[in-house]
Amino acid sequence: MMTPQQDSDEPLVFEIDGRKIKSVKDFYRQIGRAVNGRGGYFGENLDALADCLRGGFGTPENRPFVFEWQHSDVSERHLTDELRGQRSFFDTVVAVFADADVPLRLS
């Protein structure tokens, strides 16, 4: 987790460790930790995630930010089993980031 500086042009990078994500609950726990530190909260459903990505809930309102989902292939395997309609939970999360216009780097 990094502390945002006011009005910086450099994007703040939040890192998610995909090796620790084996369920939907793990995803929310890891994104909360990435943004707000150990035990940090970042919502527990897709609507809360979308709200948080708008800025101001641990993410900066006055600075660009990106998320880097490290080892995303590991968590994708687990989250593909968690289907939401016709789309996996993993694909749904990626779509939420795209809808919020927040860069998500999968590595």
Image: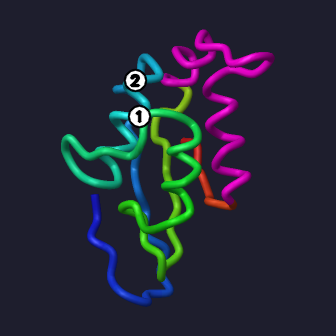
**Which residue extends farthest left?**
38
Q: Characterize the magenta stretch by its predominant secondary structure.
A: helix
Three-letter residue code for mark 2: Lys
- Name the residue: 68% across, 20% down: 88
**Which residue extends farthest right?**
86
CA distance for labels 1 and 2: 5 Å
Mark 1 near mark 2, Cβ–Cβ under 8 Å?
A: yes
Q: Position of residue 23 (x, y in %)?
A: 44, 18
Question: Viewer-proximal residue, 92 or 68?
Answer: 92
Is 11 left, or right, of 50 in this rendering? left
Quadrant location of the C terminus in the rendered image: top right
In the rendered image, which residue does mark 2 sit on? Answer: 25
In the displayed structure, would residue 56 be above or below residue 97?
below
**Label 2 crowd bin: few (<14), some (14–19), many (20+), radius 10 Å:** few
The residue stretch that appears in magenta: 74-100
- Name the residue: 66% across, 14% down: 83
Q: Is residue 88 magenta?
A: yes
Quadrant location of the N terminus in the rendered image: bottom left
Residue 16 sits in quarter: top left
In the displayed structure, would residue 21 be above or below residue 14?
above
**Label 1 crowd bin: few (<14), some (14–19), many (20+), radius 10 Å:** many
Q: Position of residue 64 (x, y in %)?
A: 53, 75
In the displayed structure, would residue 66 be above or below residue 107?
below
Three-letter residue code for mark 1: Tyr
Q: Is residue 91 magenta?
A: yes
Q: Position of residue 14 (x, y in %)?
A: 41, 56
In the rendered image, which residue does mark 1 sit on? Answer: 28
Question: Viewer-proximal residue, 47 or 76?
Answer: 47
Secondary structure state at the residue bearing disc 1 = helix
